[in-house]
Amino acid sequence: MASVTLDKLNKVFGHTHIIKDVDLRIGDGEFVVFVGPSGCGKSTLLRLIAGLESITDGELRIADDVVNDLPPRERGVGMVFQSYALYPHMSVYENMAFGLKLAKMANETVEDRVMATARILQLEELLHRKPKELSGGQRQRVAMGRAMAREPRILLFDEPLSNLDASLRVQMRNEIARLHHRLGSTMVYVTHDQVEAMTLADKIVVLRDGRVEQVGSPQELYQRPATRFVAGFIGSPTMNFMPAELLGGDDEGCRIKAPGLGELTLPQDAGGQSRGTGLSLGVRPEHLSLAEAQGDNAFEIVNVEYLGNEVYVYLEPKAGDTLLIHRSEAPSRWEIGQRVALVPELEHVHLFDTADQALGLARQRQAA
């Protein structure tokens, strides 16, 4: 195992600045997930750690060693790619042994490592098969086994489940989580799927346009997003956002006015914002209740989705162009065309300023 430290890391392709001053520490044995929309730089960052791309500026350390100029084979990393990248003419055993033989290891060592890895990944019965005889999940396990057999200090995963169907993704998520618990290895995992990030990670790194937007545990990012971007990206369904106006604030909280909600007093620091400032109010679907409509504060239900154990109710917003979502347990008494009032749980309402930064975080951190 080993820690990974990124110090002001930068990557430039031609005139395009991809990775911008990334500072990050990944501890020994941590499972860290890089998440963000397509093009945010998460795969590039992983490839910089692996040594598959050169670093333009900054310093990368694995354990206490600066590895900027080391080739991949000398960094002690193993990488599992989105495509399985298995040799079709080789058996499972030969695929897993290939890298070890290239390193000129003794045959006995190669066999010991391959068999030990096969036992961990439950591949012992498949060692004689060719890749075409395997399911997608089995091929992904072989790709993982090929990386693990080298006994790397760090395991890197580049969207390894994106080629699998929904049920296999759930199964493989569980297998990867169990693998990390069993091995205690340092793992860095890239995905665009925030569900994978939330279920696998000890620590999530949210990236946006080549910069780190926020780092924290899944619970911290869900409950205390630092920016509107993180609030909207983490969580499914996404957080509801509405425009709001600041009416005033003091040590007890702040008063706001939002279309369709009227005036609300929130137990939150106004962050030094001036009266009349335009803010963005955020509330998650499960923290938004519905009630019988009252006057001008009515919202119209435009769709109801039944998902078995829960129901999503979509509402026409009073301002903005994105539908609002209410989530509740099934069954639901609400129907399309009904007019309802929204009742947010005030202690779970988030406010974001004009720079999309969350208000009240400074007070929360001081209290912690």
Image (spheres, rainbow, N blue to C red):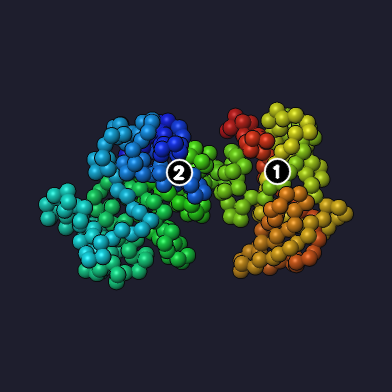
Q: Does dot 2 land on a helix, a strand or a loop?
A: loop
Q: Quadrant of residue 171?
A: bottom left
Vertical relation: 23 (above or below) 307: above
Q: Earlier in the sequence, mark 1 or mark 2?
A: 2
Badge 1 amino acid: Leu
Number of marks in picture: 2
Q: Quadrant of residue 314?
A: bottom right
The residue shown at (31%, 56%) is 144
The residue shown at (20%, 57%) is 97
The residue shown at (66%, 38%) is 352
Find residue 281 and name its label.
1
Would you call the spot at circle 1 few (<14 residues within 10 Å), some (14-19), or many (20 or more)?
Answer: many
Q: Mark 1 to mark 2: distance in Å?
A: 29 Å
Q: Position of residue 232 (x, y in %)?
A: 60, 47
Would you call the spot at circle 2 few (<14 residues within 10 Å), some (14-19), or many (20 or more)?
Answer: many
Quarter of the image where the N terminus is located: top left
Q: Residue furthest right?
A: 295
Q: Position of residue 95 (x, y in %)?
A: 23, 60
- Relative to 131, is 161 on the left or the right? right
Q: Position of residue 229 (x, y in %)?
A: 59, 43
Vertical relation: 119 (above or below) 105: below
Badge 2 amino acid: Gly
Residue at which label 2 appears = 41
Residue 330 appears in view: no
Contact (CB < 8 A) between labels 1 and 2? no
The residue shown at (69%, 53%) is 322
Q: Does dot 1 land on a helix, a strand or a loop?
A: strand
Residue 280 appears in view: yes
